[in-house]
Image (cartoon, rainbow, N blue to C red):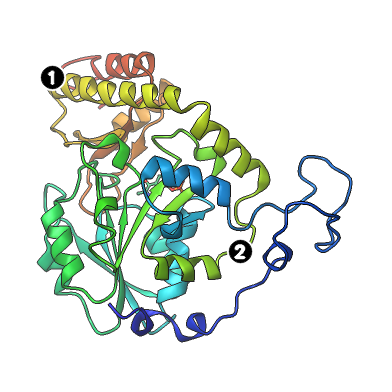
Amino acid sequence: MKLDRIIRKNIAALAPYSTARDEYKGEIGIYIDANENPYPTGYNRYPDPHQSTLKKVISEIKNIPTKNIFLGNGSDEAIDLLFRVFCEPKEDEAIVITPSYGMYSVCANINNVKLISVQLDNDYFLEADAILKNVTPSTKLIFLCSPNNPSGNLLNKDEIIKIITNFEGIVAIDEAYIDFAEDEGFVPLLNTYDNIVVLQTLSKAWGMAGLRLGMAFASEEIIDVMTKVKYPYNINCAGQHLVLEELTINKAKKEAELKEIISEREILKVELSKIKYIEKVYPSDANFILIKVPEATKLYNFLISKTVIVRNRSRITGCADTLRLTVGTPEENITLLNLLRTDEEGTFYR
Ligand SMILES: *Cc1c(COP(=O)(O)O)cnc(C)c1O
């Protein structure tokens, strides 16, 4: 793929902001080059704009060279950057699947980029041809999400590969939930395809939603442009420090919790399937389960009245009468199940 053909001209020509630390990289000295306050507070200095230490640790965990890693203020920053880098407002187009994560269309709208939504099939699986037939010479970006939110399933890998190999633009594969799946996703294929961007996050399996750390993995060329366009200090000192601590000191604890969430998901699947009025428990490779029930909004309100808050997805096209349940602690899951089991026919909420 020729990156020049799909990157916006003003971005290709952009000279990035050069920080004080870009211009002098030494370790010791009297630093009077960045107009910082000299009195130490632990955060009087600007953070590392390249997040070098953090990238090194993530590189080891993910087995990806640091040159192929971009770190952002959540994956939401990476999603927005993809539009800003590749899509000329009012000219270019992007394709998303539906139902899927809402931020792709929000970012498209903010950037004034025309978005084509392609409906997944009735069981929320992907057909490459349905996507490919919507590609025009102006299509620069295709967003896929696997495991998909809100449906929970991994998309078929062969169909994704068919899209990647038949599209001369960027395919972003959002793997926010990949750690919950028994699948290695597209990271091992980064060297095979130069037009993919794999998005992952520390918000879900790693339990750091509050720290806002998203990751994009791609070719060095793509990572370099994303890095050029990001705000220089997009990850603050406290964020970099706390994430490092979690990834190193607390790694074993995180892994044990991840295992428990996956086994709780399997228990929830079985127990939800036993409840008669639940019409469908969708397959899940993520940390949530989508269910279809009669009059979902009434069940949603019933659960709220019992202070259990789930996500009502009923208004989304293709998701009528569905609720999305995040896997909680074993105690929380029991509370949820007991409420849902109030009676067999679901008359308690209707
Ligand atoms: C939760 C989620 C994210 C995470 O976004 P962050 O900005 O990293 O917190 C990304 N994509 C999908 C599909 C999600 O559900």
Q: Quadrant of the N terminus?
A: bottom left
Q: Quadrant of the C terminus?
A: top left
Position of 12 with respect to 239 (left or right) is left
On residue 118, the disc is none
Give the mark count. Answer: 2
Q: Is residue 54 above or below residue 207?
A: below
Count neighbours of disc 1 (C-alpha within 10 A) and say few if under 14, some if 14 to 19, many if 20 or more: few
Q: Which residue corresponds to the image point at 60% horizontal and 36% vertical from the top-left?
A: 242
Image quadrant in which you'd find residue 158: bottom left
Q: Amino acid at mark 2?
A: Tyr
- The answer to whether any part of residue 347 appears in the image is no
Depth order, front residue of 137/290 = 137
**SS at badge 2:** loop
**SS at badge 1:** loop
Q: Where does the image place residue 331, in percent across and percent down from the top left? A: 37, 13
Q: Where does the image place residue 113, in percent across and percent down from the top left? A: 40, 75
| Mark 1 or mark 2, whichever is nearer to me | 2
Callout 1: CB less than 8 Å from ligand 1: no
Of the two numbered discs 1 and 2 on the same chain, state the one appearing first in sequence.
2
Q: Which residue corresponds to the image point at 36% horizontal and 65% vertical from the top-left?
A: 219
Q: Is residue 240 above or below residue 196?
A: above
Depth order, front residue of 192/259 = 192
Q: Which residue is mark 1?
A: 274
Q: Where does the image place residue 231, in percent across and percent down from the top left? A: 61, 64
- The answer to whether any part of residue 93 appears in the image is yes
Q: CA distance from mark 1 to mark 2?
A: 50 Å
Count neighbours of disc 2 (C-alpha within 10 A) and say few if under 14, some if 14 to 19, many if 20 or more: few
Q: Amino acid at mark 1?
A: Lys
Q: Which residue is mark 2?
A: 231
Position of 177 with respect to 29 (left or right) is left
Q: Is residue 250 above or below residue 331?
A: below
